[in-house]
């Protein structure tokens, strides 16, 4: 692949901007500065590391990321009252092209503004679709702080199914265990709008805090602080397959 095309594919701007970055000597391939936008880059020799304006990057044909979503951010490109989670990512990840158009990475499902925890993002439409497909039943684990003490009746109702206001079919929790008097670990395999909050309201309680700790077999790493993101390892992608 030509160097300027590679930079374009990774979100560094239009083809002209990418060629300009190279011509101005702002791109390094490994140890060496490269000023020819047409230089052929060998992608077969293991992970390609490069630098743009002093910032180190590794080439990724597709982007698969995890973000520790902090409270106070919306999972939207056009947020209302709160800043967008996409502002937590560097510009190239927000500008990666899909089918030649700037599209950037997209969140795999949404978390509410006040929900924290594991959020996946990708520019692979098929992956996003697979992860969101209701038939796939990818389990998601939520740590829920409740306003009122939990009792066995509420937990049993969450496990056996509650009816929400938009569908007569009951929604069930795959697991619901109290981890404290007002603390609950809830596993869901669907992703309805405000599902945790609505399920807790349906059993007469209320969500005070909500944190997603796991998707499929992938847990939010303890070392990833709120607001931080990182690339997913191939082995972590495997953990997301049902
Ligand atoms: N359920 C909710 O109610 N909110 C979230 O952010 C995620 C699941």
Image: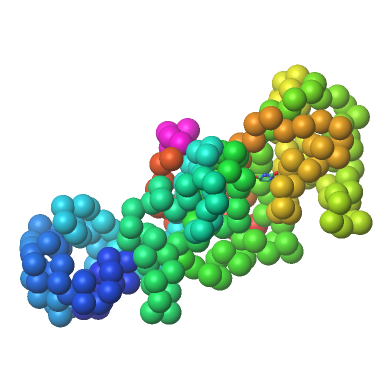
**Image vertical order of residue 33 relative to residue 228, above or below:** below
Q: Is the magenta stretch mostly helix, strand or loop?
A: loop
Seen from the viewer's position, the closer of residues 27 and 14 is: 14
Give the residue displayed 52% in from the left and 45% down from the top: 82
How many discs mark residues in the rendered view? 0
Quadrant, the N terminus: bottom left
Q: Is residue 60 left or right of residue 203?
A: left
- The question of residue 223 being in magenta is answered with yes
- The picture places residue 180, in percent across and down from the top left corner, at 72, 21
Give the residue displayed 54% in from the left and 46% down from the top: 81
Q: In this view, does 65 lie to the left or right of 91?
A: right
Seen from the viewer's position, the closer of residues 8 and 49 is: 8
**Image vertical order of residue 56 relative to residue 149, above or below:** below
Quadrant location, ligand no. 1 = top right
- The picture places residue 65, in percent across and down from the top left corner, at 45, 54
Q: Give, as a single range, the part of the protein colored magenta.
A: 220-226
Q: In this view, does 46 lie to the left or right of 21?
A: right
- The picture places residue 53, in percent across and down from the top left corner, at 16, 56
Seen from the viewer's position, the closer of residues 21 and 123 is: 21
Give the residue displayed 58% in from the left and 43% down from the top: 113
Image-quadrant location for residue 103: bottom left
Give the residue displayed 17% in from the left and 74% down from the top: 19
Quadrant, the C terminus: bottom right
- The question of residue 193 being in magenta is answered with no
């Amino acid at each position: 692949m030509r160097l300027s095309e590679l930079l374009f594919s990774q979100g560094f701007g239009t083809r002209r901007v990418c060629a300009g970055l190279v011509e101005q000597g702002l791109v390094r391939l490994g140890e060496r500065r490269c000023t020819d936008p047409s230089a052929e880059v060998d992608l077969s020799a293991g992970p390609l590391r490069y630098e743009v304006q002093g910032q180190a990057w590794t080439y990724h044909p597709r982007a698969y990321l995890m973000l520790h979503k902090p409270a106070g951010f919306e999972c939207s490109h056009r947020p209302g009252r709160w800043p967008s989670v996409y502002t937590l990512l560097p510009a190239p990840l927000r500008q990666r092209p899909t089918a030649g158009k700037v599209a950037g990475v997209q969140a795999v499902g949404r978390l509410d503004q006040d929900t924290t925890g594991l959020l996946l993002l990708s520019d692979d439409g098929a992956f996003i679709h697979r992860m969101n497909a209701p038939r796939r039943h990818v389990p998601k684990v939520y740590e829920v702080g409740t306003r009122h003490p939990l009792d066995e009746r509420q937990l049993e109702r969450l496990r056996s199914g509650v009816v929400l206001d938009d569908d007569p079919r009951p929604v069930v929790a795959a697991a619901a265990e109290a981890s404290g008097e007002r603390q609950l670990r809830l596993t869901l395999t669907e992703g309805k709008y405000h599902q945790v909050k609505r399920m807790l309201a349906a059993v007469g309680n209320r969500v005070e805090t909500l944190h997603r700790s796991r998707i499929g077999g992938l847990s939010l790493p303890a070392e990833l602080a709120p607001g931080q993101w990182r690339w997913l390892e191939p082995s972590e992608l495997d953990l997301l397959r049902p």
